[in-house]
Amino acid sequence: QIKKAFGDPYVLTSWKPETDCCDWYCVTCDSTTNRINSLTIFSGQVSGQIPTQVGDLPYLETLEFHKQPNLTGPIQPSIAKLKRLKELRLSWTNISGSVPDFLSQLKNLTFLDLSFSNLTGSIPSSLSQLPNLNALHLDRNKLTGHIPKSFGEFHGSVPDLYLSHNQLSGNIPTSLAKLDFSTIDFSRNKLEGDASMIFGLNKTTQIVDLSRNLLEFNLSKVEFSKSLTSLDLNHNKITGGIPVGLTQVDLQFLNVSYNRLCGQIPVGG
């Protein structure tokens, strides 16, 4: 049915009823149950919308449509039935519509990647209810609105957040101070105000990219953790000077260009 919904594409030629589905291309099966647990189509073209029938694979743990420019329409609601799903990747496609609220029902998700598509609307705050999420990629879409306050209240693991190249606006929620993110990429949005809550001496944050926003805060007063390896703040309205504390951080990458910084550049480190 999935093959038929896609109009019998060449990439699914091996999907023949008379052969074992565990031998089909783009599909893997669980070694004990022999039920399909992975459907990944990232080479060869499929076109049309995501078939509703993907929701009829109850043992699916990985669903991936990658680099499919002819994949259109919304994120299929029947995906909500896939309660065992751990990885959902719909990236480099032309899917549109909003990031659906029902994704928060997929409690086993560890990886959610909806990047490089045409998604619009705001980010649902319910995504913070995913207890096992390690990474959230919503970058390179057309998302608007604010970063949800609930992103400071992830229950369980704290995911890497990739929200860059969108049209997100407003302030970064202060609730983010409560969590210890490993990677944050909010670059190329329209975010304003303070971003210092992301940092802190006792955090283990490694990579922060806040470049090309409208952020406006005093860098001199920010305390940076020793764990930081990459810091990109270019093209904002950040004031103050570069704090001496940064000489104690083993940075591999630092960019604070195109801001309103003043004073001396600290020496050492």
Image: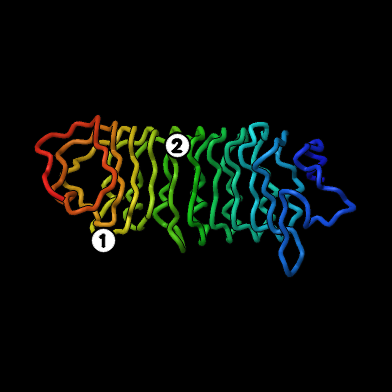
Amino acid carrying mark 2 in the image? Gly
Q: CA distance from mark 2 to mark 1?
A: 30 Å
Q: Residues within 10 Å of mark 2 (few under 14, many from 20)?
A: some
User: Residue 247 in the image: x percent, y percent?
Assistant: 16, 50
Of the image marks 2 and 1, the number of the one nearer the N terminus: 2
Q: Quadrant of residue 172?
A: top left
Say left or right for 230 vs 16: left
Q: Nearer the viewer, mark 2 or mark 1?
A: 1
Say left or right for 206 vs 35: left
Using the image, tell me which numbered label, if any, was put on residue 145.
2
Residue at screen point 58% across, 61% down? 108
Using the image, tell me which numbered label, if any, was put on residue 202.
1
Q: Residues within 10 Å of mark 1 (few under 14, many from 20)?
A: few
Direction right: furthest residue: 18
Say left or right for 14 vs 97: right
Amino acid carrying mark 1 in the image? Asn
